[in-house]
Amino acid sequence: MVQEVREVPGVPGVLVLAATALESKLLQSAGAKVVVTGVGSVNTAHALTQHLAKNGTPSLVVQTGVAGAYVPAEVAVGSVLLADTEIYGDLGVLTPHGWQPMEEIGIPLLEASLSHPARFNYFPLDARLVERAEAAAGNLVERTGKFLTVSQVTGVRAVGDVLYKRFGALCESMEGAAAAHVCAMHGVPFLEVRGISNLVEDRDRSKWRLLEAANAAQTAVMKILANL
C-alpha cells in the first residue's frame, strides 16, 4: 500500500520502504511517501519494482525497519544503524568445504555496466550519500557498517556468530539487499536505516523491543531527510 500525503521536508521525491506497518507508522503520520512491502526479499523487490513502473524514479529510496544485531558486533538493543553495504547472506553454494558466495557459481546477480562493476553478494551504497546521511542523523545513528539480508531469522547464537565472522555485518534483516539490488538496477540512490530490536542469540522473544527499535529508526530517518 502506498501512502502519499505530502513530501517529507528537506528532500523532495523520497520513497520510504518498510516491511510492515509497525515499521512505518511514524513516517506515514509525518507525511512520508511510504510503501509497506511485506516481509522478505521477494515482496520487497516486487513492491519497489511495481512502484517504479507506475510512478517513475524517486530522488532517493530509504529502507527502514528493525533488525537483529550480531552479538560480536557489540551493538545495543535500541540502537540505530546506517548501512554502507548490503549483502545477500544465503545466496551462494554449500560445498563440502563450506559455504561459498555467488562468485563460486560465476554468474553475477547484476551484470557490469558503465556505472558499476558486476555485483554478486555485495551491494555497496554510495559512500558520499552515506556520509551525508550520517552527518544529517547526528547522534541518532550509533554506527555505520555492513548489513546482511537472510531468508530466515537467525535464532541460534552460534549460527549468528558464524555469519558475523563470514561477513562482518552489524545486523541482519530480510529485505535490505533486495531493495539495494533493485535500486542499483534502476540507478536510484539508496539508504538503509534500521533500529536494533534484538540480538542474534538463542531465540527469546521476551527480550525483543520491536516498537522501540522501529520508532527509533523512523525518528532517525526523519532527521536525515530534514537535514540531508
Image: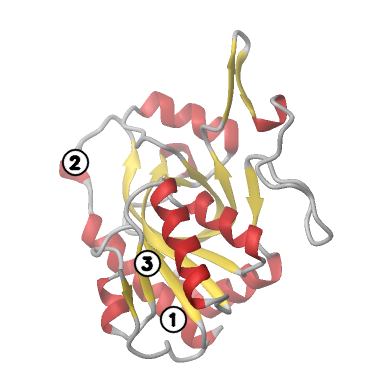
The residue singled out by tag 3 in the image is 217
The answer to which of marks 2 and 1 sits earlier in the sequence is 2
Q: Residue furthest front?
A: 54
Residue 50 on image: x %, y %: 46, 64
Three-letter code, disc 1: Lys
- Tell me if residue 88 comes above or below residue 90 in the rendering: below
Where residue 225 appears, x then y in whole percent? 48, 82
Q: Earlier in the sequence, mark 3 or mark 1?
A: 3
Q: Residues within 10 Å of mark 3 (few under 14, many from 20)?
A: many
**Circle 1 is placed at which residue position?**
223
Q: Name the residue: 57% across, 66% down.
A: 190
Residue type at mark 2 is Arg
Q: Residue at x 26, y 82 (%)?
A: 29
In the image, 139 versus 98, the foreground residue is 98
Residue 60 position, x and y percent, is 56, 75
Residue 193 visible, this orientation: no
Residue 228 found in image quarter: bottom right
Per the image, label 1 sits on a secondary structure element best described as helix
Q: Secondary structure at mark 2?
A: helix
**Res 17 → quadrant:** bottom left
> Which residue, given by chain and number where applicable, does mark 2 sit on?
205
| Distance from the alpha carbon under mark 2 to that under mark 1 | 30 Å
Q: Quadrant of the N terminus?
A: bottom left
Mark 2 and mark 3: Cα distance apart in space: 20 Å
